[in-house]
């Protein structure tokens, strides 16, 4: 059965009735602190997932596109753009008076091979690739000028040791490809917020690399508004003090901090190294999928406490944090069900597979305190 917005709101009011002044939504709980967002998929954008849409419009005041604005989808062939879903995405945000995020413009993944090669299959020259980048950014950002308020301009440009990733963007253009991407985005929409987005930059030495990168861009006069901490966390990693220190360090640079892709993995780690590399693929193993049928209550409570702790940190830094976005709406939507092991059952978000709020939802709302009435 699909929940309508009014039904969901009633459920949440009942669920929170123990606290007289408790807000009925995440966005109400954190109004005045930071916007609360979710990454939404094509079924939600087009209205096919009515249950998901009810949660989105009730709970969130910001949206990010899970995939529709990535290069392979919006610009699949030379000279051919497909704005069908992106147009509906932006219209969805406008209809519901939301802060609309564009994700993303320059990344080494989910970008077609043709982008880097000429019609003979040879790698492009620096100038040719810069021209191709500029055309893409000006076309996409320009189309939504004044309608998409924030762009993830460059995504995941750093290695774990803090050095620049040896992507084709880097190899063909050089290290200044990052500055050029921000320059082109600012040209296309001077009023848009521009973000550098990455994972694991809470931890050293990657954090030092990110700090150096942002400081270098600032010294060069590049317009950069914020840094995105993706927030693909686990129940224990990274430690709370590392997240706290990272937000402090980036805010000292004079940029805002977005928690841009928040979710919490509750399953056993599939690798020794913490990563969010989408190309990673691990063989299926029943030991890595222990909660195939349901999440045990002790783990539910650990997840709830983890979210409460995280929101406590975000609130502490509310002068620096401008957005907290969950990467998905319900557990059924989460990319973690198939990454890095396909077919697992994970429970990383605040709403379960039936669209019902979990203990983690109520913990996140309670973390806001009683500052906001319904």
Image (cartoon, grey):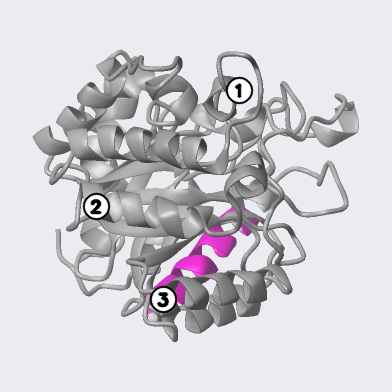
In the image, residue 362 sits, relative to residue 3, either above or below, namely below
The quarter holding residue 369 reads bottom left
Residue 168 at what x, y percent from top left? 65, 40
Q: How many marks?
A: 3
Considering depth in this image, is 65 or 215 the residue closer to the camera?
Answer: 215
If you read the primary sequence from the N terminus, does the residue marked by circle 2 or circle 3 appear first?
A: 2
Left or right: residue 354 compared with residue 124: left
User: Where does label 2 land, which residue?
Assistant: 187
SS for callout 1: helix
- Can the viewer see residue 97? yes
Q: Residues within 10 Å of mark 3 (few under 14, many from 20)?
A: some
| Number of residues whose C-alpha sits closer than 10 Å to that of mark 2, classed few (under 14), some (14–19) or many (20 or more) | some
What residue is drawn where x is 63% and y is 49%?
Answer: 170
Query: What are the residue bounds of the magenta stretch?
Result: 302-315
Is 269 magenta? The answer is no
Residue drawn at the location 13% of the way across and 46% of the way down:
146
| Residue holding disc 1 | 113
Left or right, 141 with reference to 71: left
């Amino acid at each position: 059965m699909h929940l309508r917005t009014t039904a969901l709101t009633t459920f949440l009011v009942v669920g929170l009735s123990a606290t007289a002044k408790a807000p009925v939504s995440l966005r109400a709980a954190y109004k005045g602190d930071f916007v609360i967002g979710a990454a939404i998929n094509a079924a939600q954008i087009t209205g096919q997932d009515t249950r998901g849409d009810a949660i989105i419009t009730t709970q969130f005041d910001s949206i990010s596109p899970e995939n529709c604005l990535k290069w392979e989808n919006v610009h699949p062939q030379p000279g051919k753009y497909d704005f069908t879903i992106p147009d509906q995405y932006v219209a969805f945000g406008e209809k519901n008076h939301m802060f609309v995020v564009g994700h993303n413009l320059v990344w080494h993944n989910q970008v077609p091979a043709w982008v880097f090669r000429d019609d003979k299959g040879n790698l492009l020259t620096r100038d040719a690739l810069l021209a191709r980048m500029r055309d893409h950014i000006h076309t996409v950002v320009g189309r939504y000028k004044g309608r998409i308020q924030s762009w993830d301009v460059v995504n995941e440009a750093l290695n774990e040791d803090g050095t620049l990733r040896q992507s084709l963007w880097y190899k063909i253009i050089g290290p200044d490809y990052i500055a050029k991407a921000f320059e082109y985005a600012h040209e296309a929409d001077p009023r848009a917020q521009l973000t550098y987005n990455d994972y694991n930059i809470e931890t050293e030495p990657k954090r030092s690399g990110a700090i150096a990168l942002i400081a270098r861009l600032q010294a060069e006069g590049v317009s950069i508004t914020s840094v995105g901490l993706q927030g693909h966390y686990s129940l224990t990693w990274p430690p709370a003090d590392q997240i706290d220190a990272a937000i402090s360090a980036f805010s000292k640079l004079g940029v805002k901090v977005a928690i841009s892709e928040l979710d919490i993995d509750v399953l056993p780690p599939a690798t020794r190294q913490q990563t969010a590399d989408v190309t990673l693929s691990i063989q299926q193993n029943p030991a890595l999928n222990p909660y195939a049928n349901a999440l045990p209550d002790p783990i539910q409570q650990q997840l709830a406490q983890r979210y409460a702790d995280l929101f406590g940190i975000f609130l502490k830094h509310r002068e620096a944090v401008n957005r907290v976005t969950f990467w998905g709406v319900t557990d059924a939507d989460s990319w973690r069900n198939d990454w890095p092991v396909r077919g697992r059952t994970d429970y990383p978000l605040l709403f379960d597979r039936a669209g019902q709020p979990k203990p983690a939802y109520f913990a996140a709302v309670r973390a806001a305190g009683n500052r906001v009435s319904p």
